[in-house]
Image (cartoon, rainbow, N blue to C red):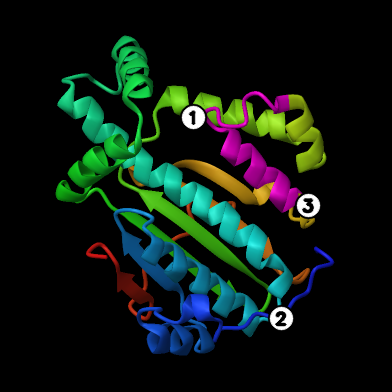
Amino acid sequence: MSSENKAIDLDDERYADIKDRASILAGINAGRKVVLVTYSLSEIMERQLDFVIAAILKFYERPALQSTLYTCLKEIVVNATRANAKKKFFDSQNLRIDDPEEYKRGNALMKEQMSEQWIEKYGGMAREADLRVTIAIEHEPAGLRAWVINDALLLSAEEARIRERFADGMSYEDLVSFYMSNADQTEGAGMGLVMNLLLLKGENINPALFRIGMVDGKTTARIEVPFTSEFKSVRGDDPGGFKERPDDIRLDYRRV
């Protein structure tokens, strides 16, 4: 793992206004999965996500993973909320997102209009349509599993692009070599996912433990992080691995 082993301070000022602090800490101490439900990654949600990750890693004495895991999950959540906004944009243009030609036309229109105002407008429409994003982190002494689940379908064109980007990422050993080869396109579609993969590789985490696909009709991204050699991946009979349980700490932030 990373040589940086700075202690995590849950009393840091950036965590001063964390919501549900006591419930989160009590749930983590009891070994319960933490589930966050939201529509967007607002500043409040960024701090909530950061705090949950920090609290779990502090509990298991794995502080060096804080930056990598937060960066990876933040990137995935941003993609998930934008996918929900994208769905509402296509609806507003009377374009079928599952039709290749209309998808191509809609993507071109979206790129022309993309701005903070676009994100606010269509993100708001996704909120009104109750297109939510669920972030869940399950943890144990052997490791953790994190899911990001959103209500927008993963289209075949997007899945193909993700597979292509993952293949690209596997050809690089670190972020420096990746940036040197892609300096002019690091903001392109799917490039953030490649950076996620390389960050995980930098922590000696098997890239195969980062997966994106369709599970039960929803787009699901999953990252598994082993702490010990006893960690077992959910890959196998259960393709998603995420099952809601009555004792989950479920926190609804759709109104923040």
Residue 147 is situated, as x and y percent measured from the top left of the image, at 48, 57
Pointer 3 or 1: first along the chain: 1
Query: Of the residues shown, which amino acid type is indicated by label 1?
Result: Glu
Pointer 2 or 1: first along the chain: 2
Pointer 3 or 2: first along the chain: 2
Residues drawn in magenta: 182-201
Whether 167 is drawn above or below 236: the answer is above
Query: Of the residues shown, which amino acid type is indicated by label 3?
Result: Gly
Quarter of the C terminus within the rendering: bottom left
Disc 3 to disc 1: CB gap under 8 Å: no
Q: Which residue is mark 3?
A: 202
Count of residue discs = 3
- Report how far apart the C-alphas of labels 3 and 2 lie in the structure: 20 Å
User: What element does badge 2 sit on?
Assistant: loop
Say if residue 72 shows up in the picture.
yes
For residue 159, which numbered disc appears in the image? 1
Q: Nearer the viewer, mark 3 or mark 1?
A: 3
**Residue at the image position 38 percent from the left and 22 percent from the top:** 111
Along the viewing direction, whichever of 110 and 226 lies nearer the viewer:
110
Q: Which residue is mark 2?
A: 7
Query: Of the residues shown, which amino acid type is indicated by label 2?
Result: Ala
**Residue at the image position 35 percent from the left and 33 percent from the top:** 115
Mark 3, Cα crowd under 10 Å, few <14 / some 14-19 / many 20+, is some
Q: Main secondary structure of the magenta part?
A: helix
Residue 90 is situated, as x and y percent measured from the top left of the image, at 24, 26
